[in-house]
Amino acid sequence: MTDRRKFLKNSALFAAFSSLGISVFAGEGGKKKKKGKTNPNSVAGKPLVISTWKHGLAANEGAWKVIDAGGRALDAVEQGVMVTESDKTNTSVGLGGFPDREGIVTLDASIMDERGMAGSVAFVQGIEHPISLARRVMDKTPHALLVGAGAELFAKQEGFVKQKNTLTDTTRKAWQEWMKEKNYKPVINIENHDTIGLLAIDKRGNVSGACTTSGLSWKMHGRVGDSPIIGAGLFVDNEFGAATCTGLGESVLRTLASFLAVECMRRGATPQEACEEAIARIVKKHANFKDFQVGILAITPAGEHGGYAIHKGFNYALHQGGNNRMIDSDYYNKEGK
């Protein structure tokens, strides 16, 4: 009788889980035995560096130098995004970024290593490499996040030089032009809201990630997006993988999209399935999803990857097997506006 009751109970649980689309044939950590949907551009293989948007090509090269020399993924992701932070022609990352509506450039960044340790800074001004300051927060403080004046004081204590005049001729002219009408509206796939998120796997098989941005152009002074928030713009779990986001940060913050993607992989999803689930969650929670863009990347420790976005136009740079190339991401909104 006891065995019959167990059988009936297990059958009921099986039916319940199946109706929810959850596999009960899972191994340790929730890994499915059967492979799901994969990205056609993805093959297992490490080391690997992957990053968002075209500026990721140069960032990947910077990261790959560290990887190729046998360095840590953590050092690679820091060095990689520093390339983009130093590019004054990039108007969405670093000191060359567009300012807020007060004409002030404020920067956000986060970094996370294979141990699950993380450091972030938000709303900092005049620091050329906020990603390096984020790493100092991780390495030298008991905290995970420092913001504003406190982060800048810590930067001074650590020997960072604060630059006073951070507007370039290009960004100053753009801000002055925007001030004429003060029309605040993010534009899909245009660099007024684009981050660089970079993920890497080193030769030891360890995973790390970095994310850095100047945030939305013409934002309210004091606004902070998803990039410095662990679980939103970036999340790393050395056992199951990592994810990073780019696009309208508010929507990513509301859904913790990077954590969601990694959690999906922990439960057995492929990186492509994980990215699609994260975007589906954003779409479901935002009736105005047709008005903004979000793109997401995810990787497994084996070197498989996924990429997905709300709209057409999101692309990413993949450095794997000695080849650094751009890939156009698949996307949700096939009907357009």
Image (cartoon, rainbow, N blue to C red):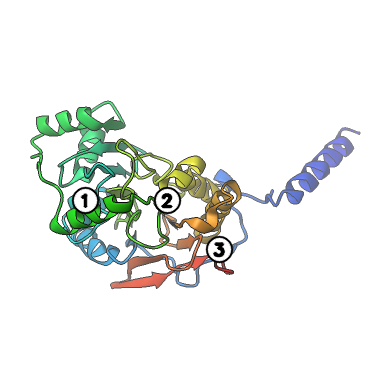
- The image quarter in which residue 124 lies: top left
Q: Are marks 1 and 2 in contact (CB under 8 Å)?
A: no
Is 152 drawn above or below residue 37 in the view shown?
A: above
Q: Earlier in the sequence, mark 1 or mark 3?
A: 1
Q: Nearer the viewer, residue 258 or 185?
A: 185
Which residue, given by chain and number where applicable, does mark 2 sit on? 248
Who's the residue at 51% across and 43% down the image? 255
Amino acid on which the number 1 mark rests in the picture: Gly
Residue 9, image x and y in percent? 83, 38
Which residue, given by chain and number where applicable, does mark 1 sit on? 94
Residue 90, image x and y in percent? 22, 59
Give the position of the C terminus as an image quadrant: bottom right
Q: Nearer the viewer, residue 324 or 153?
A: 153
Q: Find the distance from the CA under tag 1 to the CA under tag 3.
A: 30 Å
Residue 228, image x and y in percent? 33, 41
In this figure, what is the number of numbered marks? 3
Give the position of the N terminus as an image quadrant: top right
Residue 260, image x and y in percent? 51, 45
Amino acid on which the number 2 mark rests in the picture: Leu
Which residue, given by chain and number where applicable, does mark 3 sit on? 332
Who's the residue at 34% across and 38% down the image? 223
Label 3 CA crowd tier, 10 Å (few <14, some 14–19, many 20+): some
Amino acid on which the number 3 mark rests in the picture: Tyr
Q: Are marks 1 and 3 in contact (CB under 8 Å)?
A: no
Considering every residue shown, the one lying at the far right of the view is: 1
Who's the residue at 24% across and 52% down the image? 175
Label 2 CA crowd tier, 10 Å (few <14, some 14–19, many 20+): many
Who's the residue at 24% across and 61% down the image? 59
Q: Find the distance from the CA under tag 2 to the CA under tag 3.
A: 16 Å
Q: Earlier in the sequence, mark 2 or mark 3?
A: 2
Is 15 drawn above or below residue 68 in the view shown?
A: above
